[in-house]
Image (cartoon, rainbow, N blue to C red):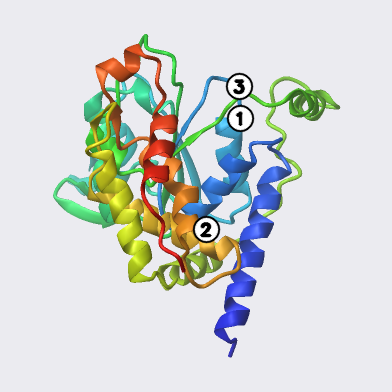
Amino acid sequence: METETNTIARATELLGRLREAIGQSLVGQTAAVEQVVVALAASGHVLIEGVPGLGKTLLVRALAKALTLDYGRVQFTPDMMPSDVTGHAVLDPSTQQLRVVRGPIFTHVLLADEINRAPAKTQSALLEVMQEYQVTLEGQTLPVPKPFMVLATQNPIESEGTYTLPEAQLDRFLFKIEIGYPSLEEELDIVVRSTLNRTGDELPLSAVKPVLNERLVLGLQQIVARQRVDQQVLEYATRIVRATREWAGLVLGSGPRGVLALIRGARAVALTDGRDFVTPDDVKRVTLPALRHRIALSPDAMLEGRKVNDLLNAVVESVNAPRM
């Protein structure tokens, strides 16, 4: 039987291999890759934001290919109905009874592409499953397979034909990951990888090999759940979240789910670093992705051109970290 130290070391190695596998197709974006891996280990969902062409879909596809799990994709559009995501009932001619046809949501890894292009009633189709890992269809409660992860994408600047995600929907995401422009060297590498011996716009996924299966992913998530969190670290994370509710420039602070996201993310970060305990620095590392979608700038702050990330960094710096 493995000792706890060997278990942690093995888990850290597997998470490192997963990051490397995703990196075989995605150039740069190391922070985004790390945060997706951390979210998977923490059994959380992620919202990925970035302008077109920066690799949002590629990141999700690479993750799915590195996992031997079922993968599904839903392209959200303004005319989409909730049943297009969850499923619907049809009349079976042979039995004259209603038969439930399961939708694409019944999978392990779901890409909700351009989620903000669908109206609120369709976005709400994800609320139950993201929280309770089940779908209610025609009065039946049907569980989705575990592990289950929703990775949604959206464009931060496009407004025509889009619908703002309601706070309840945003709060279901463990992380909001921002993907920015690559450096000059990275962009050159992208061009080479995407054009050398390739036709059309095919995604460069051939180098990604499976790393984790269902059993290993569930095992990693159990290890993360067992990570030790000192009372002082719990209080530190709580003070950060509470500070957002009174910070100048913020009209909306984070709710209690923000603390849960900080702790869950920090546990997974600790595991990626090969530790079985959480430090205040682990909490700091996940503050931006865990809280940036749970707060809102005041009108004055927006007029002044202030950024959510800058205000969050200021909040973290204002809260004294415990000495461990």
- Does residue 281 appear left or right of residue 105 in this picture? right
Task: Of the two numbered discs 1 and 2 on the same chain, state the one appearing first in sequence.
Answer: 1
Tell me the SS state at disc 3: loop
Closer-to-camera residue (7/211):
7
The residue where tag 2 is placed is 269
Q: Position of residue 299 (x, y in %)?
A: 26, 16
Tell me where residue 27 sits by quadrant: top right
Give the percent coordinates (x, y) of residue 168: 23, 38
Kindly check if marks 2 and 3 are in contact, taking CB atoms under 8 A apart as contact.
no
Q: Tags 1 and 3 in contact by the CB under 8 Å rule?
A: yes
When the figure is inspected, residue 11 is found, relative to residue 146, above or below; the finding is below
Please give left or right for residue 122 compared with residue 20 in the image: left
Residue 266 rendering spot, x and y as whole percentages: 45, 58
Q: Nearer the viewer, mark 2 or mark 3?
A: 2
> Do we see residue 100 in this rendering?
no
Three-letter amino acid code of the residue under disc 2: Val
Residue 228 picture quarter:
bottom left
The residue labelled by disc 1 is 55
Which is more foreground, mark 1 or mark 2? 2
Which structural element holds mark 2?
helix
Q: Residues within 10 Å of mark 3 (few under 14, many from 20)?
A: few
Q: Residue flagged by tag 3: what amino acid is it?
A: Gly
User: Badge 2, how many Cα within 10 Å: few under 14, some, many 20+?
Assistant: many
Disc 1 residue type? Answer: Gly
User: Residue 8 or 151: which is nearer the viewer?
Assistant: 8
Query: Relative to 313, is 213 on the left or the right?
Result: right
Identify the residue under disc 3.
Answer: 53
Residue 151: assigned label: none
Q: Judge whether 15 appears above or below 125 on screen.
A: below
Q: Residue furthest bottom?
A: 1
Real-space CA distance between mark 1 and mark 2, rounded to the nearest whole angstrom? 23 Å
